[in-house]
Image: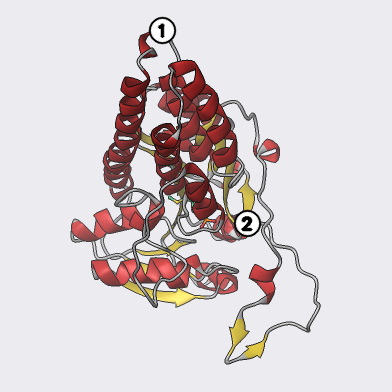
Amino acid sequence: MIDQRLLPGEYREVSFESCTQVAEAIQRMVVRGAPAIGAAAAFGMALAAQTSPAGNSDELRADLVAAAGILQAARPTAFNLSWAVQRMLLESEGPAREDVNQLRASLLDLAQRIADDDVQINRQMATHGAGLMNAGETVIHHCNTGALATVDWGTALGVIRMAHEQGKRPHVLVDETRPRLQGSRLTAWELDQYGISYEIITDNAAGFFLSRGEVDRVFVGADRVAANGDVANKIGTYMLALAARDNQVPFFAVVPTSTVDLSVAEGAQIPIEERDPSEVLQIEAQGAPIAPAGAAARNPAFDITPHRLITGIVTENGVVYPPFELNLRQAVMESPS
Ligand code: MRU
């Protein structure tokens, strides 16, 4: 993995040798972004299989169930995490899986397939999403949804990247994305690599630019989408969607179908991760603290954007428009499970 906590100051690759280490890396956000977490968790399961001393398939399956619990507890909101872990568990079931070493090998194969598929899926979404954009558009982008947040290419940022490669010359207003600053630290770093024009804005400036008519479109990713189209994404997405709607600016979520959780009827049922308040309090401004010592803080990592504020959801199977309840389910069903 690339240790994303160090960017943009330092690029460092790190590797892990056990499922527990992978779970810790997900929890501490060495790796982050829903599809990247999903692929990492799949390899965490493959590692659990490789390192398990099990002598037969039943013992190995018991170890895998334990590993699944550890990985799924690492971050609760991103659906791709449990989606990938459940796929790995399913792979281990069934009478055809009796040879323990064959089972280990097939789990590693599946983890690699999940990772490879993600790249392909991102490119499909990027093509569908870039088709929505006209030349010279200015877009607002929230958090980081690029190659770092996926296995490669990206979701919302992947759309912008594809539009750039098509010669459409998009300009990006990059929400800095408090408190962990995934926008200014990671998205800006990626845009530099791709040679895409951008400016970083504070999250609370987005409404200003939207109201001035300076923004053509908003693109965000998602960590989990409910069956009715409500989107859980990085904290601040809801306010951005409200401001976009008030100014009639189209608002798109770019989402692989592996992020859609049809078992959850609406956004209110999606578990929202609350992270340590220190993430809010400990940013230092030129060496000076930004809050009084001992100040309390709340730190929800995600919020819910109701589907009524969303113009469309870009998936690998095309752009889904309302009624989301019906059309999203159809898009999910088109993907092989
Ligand atoms: O807390 P993070 O940095 O993992 O949150 C990431 C996001 O909110 C992204 O928008 C989401 O995972 C989609 S990324 C392809």
Using residue 132 as the reference point, say whether residue 185 is left or right of it: right
Q: Does residue 298 appear to the left or right of 314 in the view shown?
A: right
Taking the spot 44% from the left edge, 61% from the top edge, the residue there is: 141
Q: Nearer the viewer, mark 1 or mark 2?
A: 1
The residue that disc 1 covers is 95
**Quadrant of res 202:** bottom right
The picture places residue 166, in percent across and down from the top left corner, at 19, 56
Query: Taking 239 as reference, is 192 left or right?
Result: left
- Amino acid bearing label 2: Ala
Q: Give the answer, above or below, for where 127 lies relative to 197.
A: above
Q: Position of residue 298 (x, y in %)?
A: 74, 63
Q: Earlier in the sequence, mark 1 or mark 2?
A: 1
Q: Is residue 146 at least partly visible in the picture?
A: no
- In the image, residue 140 sits, relative to residue 233, either above or below, namely below
Residue drawn at x 60%, y 60% is: 236
**Residue type for callout 1:** Pro
- Label 2 sits on residue: 301
Q: How is the image coloured?
A: secondary structure
Vertical comparison of 2 with 124: above or below: below
The residue carrying mark 2 has its beta carbon less than 8 Å from ligand 1: yes
Q: Which residue is drawn at the image coordinates 80% and 71% (left, top)?
A: 296
Residue 12 visible in the snapshot:
yes
Front one among 275 and 106: 106
Residue 217, given in percent of the width and then of the height, sits at: 42, 58
Provide the secondary structure element on which disc 2 rests. loop
